[in-house]
Image: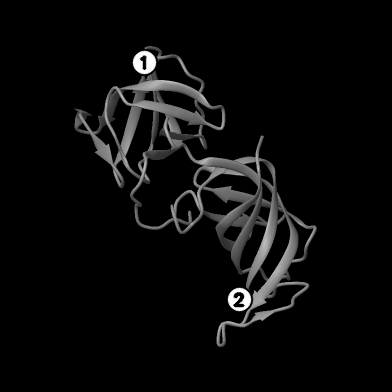
Amino acid sequence: EVSGPPSSGPFRMPVQWINRPGPDFRGAAGRVCAGAVRPGDRVRVLPSGVGTCVQDIITWGGTQVCAEAGDSITLTFTDEVDIGRGDVIAAASGAPAMADQFEARVLWMGSGEMMPGRSYLLKAHAKEMRATVTAITHRLDVWSGAQLAAKTLALNDIGVVSLSTAQPLVFEPYDVNRTLGAFILIDPVTFETVAAGMIARALRRAA
């Protein structure tokens, strides 16, 4: 998984799995990647947009009154909400955006060339979806920093590309949040990781 150190800002936690040890308990488990959360805080589940309040924060040591960036926790909520792996739980005010068109910088690691129009499996935080490289804007010369015209990217090339995802992705630019802004591309046939990327901006926000 591509990620960096925890960032500051409003609360964000990608859901890694649903913790359900018995019929009477259901919690959303993950690692806080930004901000802090306390019982009673109003949060929003994305991409559904459903709002609820945090009931308990649970760790291996029991319940606690606060969790912050870097903590691995399980959250329970005051309402019955539909939450799944790959969702993002965020502060209700100032929740992250969703989009299905992105500009991103990628390091190409595939043995074959990256070519526009080809479909890949994109994995960002705990979310997986189909994605297509729609255009290569330019390739970066690692020695001079110059932007060079390119129709493909070869092994170890760094380029700026446009991506289209099959469904809206909850994200923040990599410069804002390294967890929600990082992704990898996987070849759907060989399952080889062919690129590591950083989202720069949305080209079109999701409705």
Q: Amino acid at mark 2?
A: Asn
Disc 1 + disc 2, Cβ < 8 Å? no
Residue 186: tell me if it is visible: yes
The relative height of residue 66 versus residue 174 in the rendered view (above or below) is above
| Residue 92 horizontal/vertical position (percent) | 42, 30
User: Where 1 falls versus 145 (above or below)?
Assistant: above
Say if residue 194 shows up in the picture. no
> Left or right of 48: which side holds 129?
right
In the rendered structure, the answer to whether residue 127 lies left or right of residue 19 reads right
Q: Which mark is residue 156?
A: 2
Q: Residues within 10 Å of mark 2 (few under 14, many from 20)?
A: few
Where disc 2 sits, the SS reads loop
Q: Position of residue 27 (x, y in %)?
A: 38, 24
Q: In which quarter of the view is residue 160 placed?
A: bottom right
Q: Which amino acid lies under the numbered mark 1 shown in the image of this protein?
A: Thr
Q: Which mark is residue 86?
A: none
- Please tell me which residue is depicted at 66% across the width and 34% down the height of the picture: 207
Question: Which residue appears at 50% of the width and 49% of the height?
Answer: 172
Which is more N-terminal, label 2 or label 1? 1
Where is residue 149 drawn, in percent x and y?
74, 78
User: What residue lies at 71% left-to-right and 68% top-to-bottom?
Assistant: 137
Residue ID at (61%, 60%)? 104
Please rate how many residues cluster around mark 1, counting C-alpha atoms within 10 Å: few if below 14, some from 14 to 19, many from 20: few
Q: Quadrant of residue 26?
A: top left
Check disc 1 and report the residue beneath it. Answer: 78
Mark 1 vs mark 2, CA separation in Å: 48 Å
Q: Secondary structure at mark 1?
A: loop
